[in-house]
Image (tube, rainbow, N blue to C red):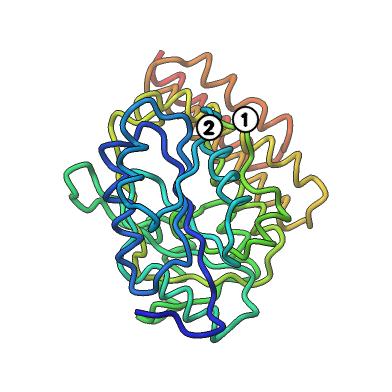
Amino acid sequence: MPMPDHSPRFSVIIPAYNSEGTIADAIDSVLAQSWPAHELIVVDDGSSDATADRVRAYGDRVRYIHQPNAGVSAARNHGIRAANGDWLAFLDADDLYLPDRLRWHAEWIQREPGLDFHVGNFEHRDETGRPLGTGMQGTAVGQRLLAQAGGGHEVVMEGDAILQFIEHQFSDVRCLSVPKPLMEAVGGFPEGIAVGEDVYCIVQLCARARAIGVITAPMAVYTVHDAGAIRSDSLRAQAESVATFKRLQEALRDANPGVRRALRGLVRRGRRDWATALLRQGRRGEALRAILPELIEAPGPSALRDLLSVLRGVRGRA
């Protein structure tokens, strides 16, 4: 299917590390799009398995770039620098695009070029392919936007909804379509961050946005792996998420008051989740130490309620 003239040209970027078992399915899902990508770039982040062979088998249908191992953000940023398209889209090597993922955004971009960037709904599936729900159904702001769409598959997110999205994201990098100049303006993905780099990037984009297009139908599939780094060491991941959110607060310290308020909510949620997980493991002192900075940094009724909730948990397990 040829692309219409003057249409958005998508560079799809896949970072890959030791992905020999999944990379072909990810690539196939991009090549099967009803709106063809302008180019598909796979950035191999120093794999030691057969990832390179799997990718090179596609010949000139895929641009293959190898770099020494430097992390997923560095790999995505390498792909951004190499991209020739005017719009960027991303996919992880163990996930999939659904067939109309690019078309839905492309057609909307043509009709309404004034939107800053686009996101969308996605499916969670386990490793057997069993559905586990969607991103928008899992948050209050996502549910409100689904209701606002009234059964349609497009809705514009603006104003307070963007602020709520900063705190409770229902989309992720798999569904992000962003003009290359805007991604370059925010500095791409933050390097040196192990967890939450995608949240960091999307919040940076939101801080500059007035109107964001949201596709309410699932556009991509996120596969939940029990052996993944986040699920296998959730406490470490939650601690690192809080550190990422704090770094984001510092980066956006001069943002408008609404964005700063939403970021305080994001940090608060991260601390609360971390403390709750520690309590479940009986690590009561660590739970208190996780939540106490909230009372110091952002004193108020919300922080006090969270502290009291942890204290009740400590007493209940004493």
Q: How far apart are marks 2 and 1 (CA)?
A: 8 Å
Q: Which of 184 and 275 is in front in this view?
A: 184
Tell me the element at label 2: loop
Instruction: Report the front residue among 161 and 90.
Output: 90
Residue located 31% across and 32% down the image: 50
Quadrant of the rendered image containing residue 193: top right
Position of 225 with respect to 185 (left or right) is: left
Q: Quadrant of residue 48?
A: top left
How many dots with numbers? 2
Q: Which of 46 and 250 is in front in this view?
A: 46
Amino acid type, callout 1: Gly
For the residues labelled 2 and 1, say whether their Cβ atoms are less than 8 Å apart: yes
Looking at the rendered image, the quarter that the N terminus falls into is bottom left
Q: Is residue 301 left or right of residue 148?
A: right
| Residue at image mark 1 | 192
Query: Quadrant location of the C terminus?
Result: top left
- Residue to which mark 2 is pinned: 71
Residue 179 position (above or below residue 248): below
Q: Residue furthest right?
A: 254
Characterize the local packing of mark 2: few (<14), some (14-19) or many (20 or more) Cα atoms within 10 angstroms: some
Please report the residue visible at 53 percent of the width from the left and 80 percent of the height from the top.
7
Q: Reading the chain from its start, which is encountered first: label 2 or label 1?
A: 2
x, y percentage for residue 123? 31, 56
Measured from the top left, where is residue 305 in percent x and y? 57, 37
Percent position of residue 80, x then y: 59, 51
